Amino acid sequence: MNNRIELLKKLLEENKDVSDYKINRTNTLSSELFFVHRTLETSRATDVCDTGVTVYVDHDGKKGESAFAVYESMTETDLKLKIAEAAARAKLVFNEPYDIPGGEKTEREVPSNFRDYEPKELAAKIAEAAFKADRYENGSINALEVFVYKHVKTVVNSKGVDVTEVKYDAMIEAIPTWNENGESVELYEAYRFTEFDADEITAEIDEKMKEVRDRKHAVKPAEKIEADVVLNVKEAGELFSELASDLTYASVYSHYNLHKIGDDLQNGDGDKITLEMKGAMKGSEYSAAFDADGVSLADKKIISGGKVEGYFGTNRFASYLGEKPTGDLKCVSVEKGSLTDKELAEKPYLECVSLSGLQIDLYNDYIGGEIRLAYYRHDGLVEPVTGISMSGKLSEVLAGIRLSDKTKVRGYYGGPYKVLLKGMEII
């Protein structure tokens, strides 16, 4: 791998049109298991390298850039041609000038207990934990695929950046199925994680088994539901990610941001939102030590007590704004609130389990979505419902929002595992 990078550096530096360059290389090792029902059909290991080169050309007082993929089969002649073509394309791009980052040399590893296992052994343990949830008379896991990954990511550039990071994660792809009265319902589940916890894996797949069962039994409510709406962890993450996306350096520079520092997002009596963008968060596969530019990631609190406190973003747009780059932060961390499970159960509410996609429009002050499955919890009853939608005014929802006092990490999000929205219309 190092020989390939050294060759690319040599060829890039020989091309007089190239002002700067960046090389991104990821080597991914995997152990994979494929089951049909409980029968192991295929077991394999892979070793894959992905390399990309970005060429920068300073011209006419501007900075152009262009990127291309590098394949292992490419000869030195092929690479020279690709570099020349990229440099020519970069001359057609007229970005404002900025300095690419420089100087850092480091090797890091994102902590994970995956290191304690052989990859094939770990994949087998993950499959065993998943199949423990296959315990329902009318339910089954029709297919299960397990992938255990080790990623070695390297960024090298013309300014002396030379950083390498080792990361681990795993993914389960499952098809939970429910068969009853001659009819069948299936779901697709993709679950990623970075720490092995057998009980947590079983609980996650068991939750999906119950979900597919309840989809079979869910009906459209006979009457309009008047109740608060509760989002679970996936949609909670989508809500807070949307708020964060408005506060990037890129949005500010392009004048796309709706809110600015000092703005109050919550003029009401709900739980106050405190949101921090992070480079790493235990349990998140998005955790990293540095971004694609090789910039070390620096956590940044952007919302505190419901008010905008700062912005975050990459080296390029930080440079334009005269700000310190935080790097391309991926993890959204939200502080817990005051809503207990006991308090939540005191009033009727509609718990959204599956949406076609949470729809948020900051500029039109809208939040809503079509509901595929929800639980209407009232009077001691739990009714699975479907065929309905919800909508509300985002500013009013944020004003009265309640955040659970328990947190969970899922994907890029870590924060309250339930979020209660008041004032939503359910139709």
Image: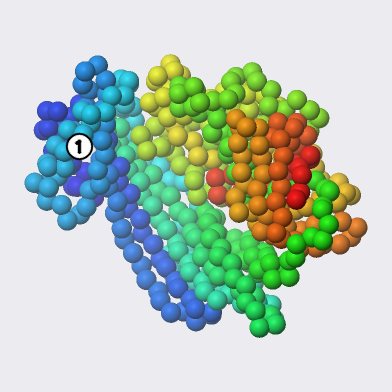
Of residue 197 and residue 11, the one placed in the foreground of this image is 11
Q: Nearer the viewer, residue 385 or 113?
A: 385
Q: Secondary structure at mark 1?
A: helix
| In this rendering, position of residue 423 left or right of residue 148 | right
Report the coloring of the rendering. rainbow
Q: Residues within 10 Å of mark 1 (few under 14, many from 20)?
A: many
Give residue 355's position: percent from left, percent from top. Answer: 64, 54
Q: Residue at x 12, y 28 (%)?
A: 16
Residue 116 appears in view: no
| Residue at x 44% of width, y 39% of height | 289
Report which quarter residue 304 is drawn in: top right
Q: Is residue 322 above or below residue 407?
A: above
Depicted 155 relative to depicted 381: above or below: above
Residue 4 percent location from the top left of the image: 19, 47
Residue 364, x across and y down, in percent: 62, 32
Instruction: Work out whether residue 112 can be spotted.
Output: yes
Label 1 is placed on what type of residue? Answer: Ala
Residue farthest toward the left in the current orientation of the protein:
77
Could you tell me residue 122's position as x and y percent?
A: 49, 66
Give the residue at x 78% y 34%: 400
Taking the spot 18% from the left edge, 47% from the top edge, the residue there is 3
Horizontally, is 355 left or right of 396 in the view?
left
Q: Is residue 123 left or right of residue 333?
A: left
Quickly name the residue at label 1.
86
For residue 89, which quarter of the picture? top left
Q: Quick check: 199 left or right of 266?
A: left
Between 370 and 10, which is closer to the camera in this rendering? 370
